[in-house]
């Protein structure tokens, strides 16, 4: 069996303390720029991205920044989900290509 066939589509992630702080910072603010949030929380943009991804679905990510899922419109949620599904498809394609190259080496 190939590794890609055994991967679940979604994995549950527990929130972190920073994720909880990020949720609090986003309440009532609409879309907020990642750089602004990083400055407010004294962390890097990379850490903000990680905290958002570990917020148990509470935070949407988009070109405009981050927004609470509970405060988003259905169009915003659908757009964010579509972007994530596109990323999933791209990662699965890359995994399959990597496995193909690995298995073709003939060892």
Image (cartoon, rainbow, N blue to C red):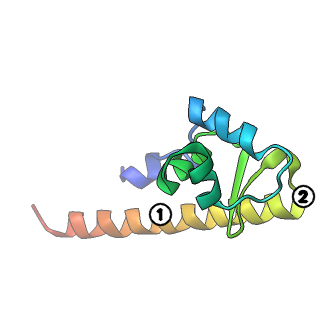
Residue 96 versus residue 16 in the image, above or below: below
User: Hey, which residue is sitting farthest right in the picture?
Assistant: 73
Residue 83 versus residue 7 in the image, above or below: below
Say whether residue 65 is left or right of residue 47.
right
Residue 24 versus residue 4 in the image, above or below: above
Using the numbered discs, state the Cα–Cα distance from disc 1 to disc 2 in whole angstroms: 27 Å
Dot 2 falls on a residue whose secondary structure is: loop
Say whether residue 10 is left or right of residue 26.
left
Q: At which x and y percent is residue 4?
A: 42, 54
Q: At which x and y percent is residue 16?
A: 56, 31
Say whether residue 50 is left or right of residue 24.
left
- Identify the residue shown where x is 62% and y is 37%: 19
On residue 47, which mark appears?
A: none
Dot 1 falls on a residue whose secondary structure is: helix
Residue 10 seen from this side: no
* Residue ID for mark 1: 91
Q: At which x and y percent is residue 2?
A: 36, 53
| The image quarter in which residue 79 lies | bottom right
User: Hey, which residue is sitting farthest left in the picture?
Assistant: 107
| First reached walking from the N terminus: tag 1 or tag 2 | 2
Q: Dot 2 surroundings within 10 Å: few (below 14), some, or many (20 or more)?
A: few
Quarter of the picture holding the C terminus: bottom left
Q: Dot 1 surroundings within 10 Å: few (below 14), some, or many (20 or more)?
A: few
Q: At which x and y percent is residue 70?
A: 85, 44
Instruction: Work out whether residue 30 or residue 15 is closer to the camera in this orientation and state it.
Output: 30
* Residue ID for mark 2: 73
- Identify the residue shown where x is 51% and y is 69%: 90
Which of labels 1 and 2 is toward the front? 2
- Identify the residue shown where x is 64% and y is 57%: 36
């Amino acid at each position: 069996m190939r590794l890609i066939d055994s991967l679940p589509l979604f994995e549950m992630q527990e929130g972190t303390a920073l994720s909880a702080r990020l949720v609090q910072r986003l309440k009532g603010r609409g879309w907020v720029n990642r750089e602004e949030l990083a400055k407010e929380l004294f962390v890097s943009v990379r850490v903000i991205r990680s905290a958002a991804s570990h917020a148990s679905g509470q935070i949407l990510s988009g070109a405009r920044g981050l927004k609470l899922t509970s405060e988003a419109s259905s169009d915003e949620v659908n757009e964010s989900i579509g972007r994530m599904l596109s990323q999933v498809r791209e990662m699965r394609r890359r995994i399959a290509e990597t496995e193909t190259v690995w298995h073709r080496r003939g060892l």
